[in-house]
Amino acid sequence: MTEPFDHLLEKYARLVVRVGANVQPGQEVVVSALPEQADAARAITAEAYRVGASRVTLEYRDPFAKRAAVEHGPEEMLGKAQEHEFVQVRGWKQTRPAMISLTGNPHPTLMDGLDPARLAKAVPVELIQEVMPLTTTNQVAWTVVGAPTKGWADSVGVSDVAALWDAVATSMRLHEADPIAAWQAHVARLGARAAVLNAHGFDKIRYRGPGTDLTLGLTSRSRWIGGAVQNEAGVEFVPNMPTEEVFVSPDWRRAEGTVRTSAPFFLASMGALVEGLELEVRDGTVTGATAERGEEAVQAQFDLIPRSRHFGEVAIVDADSAVAATGLVYKDMLFDENVGSHIAWGMGYTAAMDDTVQLSQEQRIDEGLNQANTHVDIVIGSPEVQIDGIHADGSSVAVTRGNEFVLSD
């Protein structure tokens, strides 16, 4: 590690609290973490109080308890949340806390050997349905950040936790003289890139490369965004740290073609690593899925979660990515989605489709914005994959070539 751990952790917490969640004086904060991530959770808690948080609640969840339930618990209780959990979430709808979630699986093989069907049933779908509107419609300021642990470092294949922290620090621009200023400049660059895309008003986006020829339609409401967004109170925050993407919510009904992932990804809800995934897409629906690894887990999620076979995000990441510069496969969606351009099945974001926040879920679906109790990003970009924007008249414009963003205004 290039600097004392306590100094690095303090800088990290400062960035997460002041830029990621942008905690406001007097605001409540909720930090969600695993027990192994306690050091980072505690540092974030202390920093939140420094900036004036009124109360910080630490929510620890234990994956070993989940495994025990899947392995031995009664099937009718799998995925059933307790009433106090619903009460807590409903309270958040009133208090509007800043929400900070820590990611980075310290036990990536913990769910190996479990029945995929029981594992899928263990997902607390009803509770997720209560929580997701808070974040997907930006009712609150929220951010997701990594928290290195030994188990995560081992799965990534680095020498130790310090080496993983160094990689995360690079991805988070913590080695810059002023990380907060560096992030503000980075967010501005992503915002400018999104503005260029919006100025073109594309009707479709097409990805073409080895194993991939996929076209995704947009709606007249679709809007590219990148970096920072605002919650309903007008507070600017950065939902994902790190982030290297500009993204848009597509029309879920207008996707056609085939696609192959260019990087592995960890399907967290199923505890499964997925590699070599290939999808067939017809009339906006995933009609076929095969994978070199993790196929059963993907199929189980598609079968369990309504509308998970439709797309909710289209994203562009080019060779400037600080995450890609580390050369690692993190086996964590937050980091791995920022290695290259990607798409996501499941929930689409109201922030990336104008005038949909006040609509009901059914109305959003009618307008082309997919709604589902999952959101899974899969990387499909590489230097061999080119992205084109297609106008309503059928004319095509290069957006990326050789993994470089080439579109101009």
Image (spheres, helix red, strand yellow):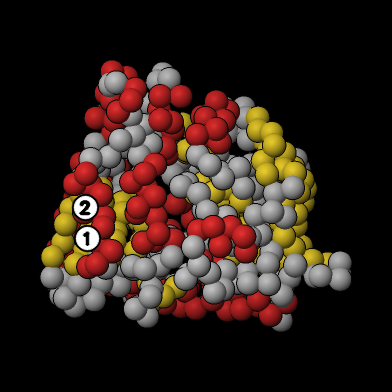
| Mark 1 crowdedness (10 Å alpha carbons): few <14, some 14-19, many ≥20 | few
Left or right: residue 356 versus residue 384 is: left
Residue at the image position 56 percent from the left and 36 percent from the top: 302
Residue 305 shows up from this direction: yes
**Which is more toward the observer, 121 or 59?**
121
Q: Position of residue 357 (x, y in %)?
A: 48, 69
Residue at the image position 49 percent from the left and 55 percent from the top: 323
**Which is more toward the observer, 349 or 48?**
349
**Which is more toward the observer, 197 or 319?**
197
Q: Is residue 43 above or below residue 192?
A: above
In three-dimensional space, the C-alpha distance between marks 1 and 2, rounded to whole angstroms, equals 6 Å
**In the current view of this chain or complex, which residue is farthest to the right?**
394
- Identified by mark 2, the residue type is Val
| Mark 2 crowdedness (10 Å alpha carbons): few <14, some 14-19, many ≥20 | few
Residue at the image position 79 percent from the left and 66 percent from the top: 390
Q: Is residue 86 above or below residue 359?
A: above
Element type where label 2 sits in the image:
helix
Left or right: residue 342 versus residue 138 is: right
Q: What residue did someone put label 1 on?
A: 91
Q: Position of residue 2 (x, y in %)?
A: 30, 56
Left or right: residue 204 versus residue 104 is: right
| Residue 87, disc | 2
- Identified by mark 1, the residue type is Gly
Q: Is residue 168 above or below residue 26?
A: above
Element type where label 1 sits in the image:
helix
Question: On the rendered image, what quadrant is the C terminus found in?
Answer: bottom right
- Asked whether the residues under the numbered discs 1 and 2 touch, taking CB atoms below 8 Å apart as contact, a structural biologist would say yes
Residue at the image position 38 percent from the left and 36 percent from the top: 123
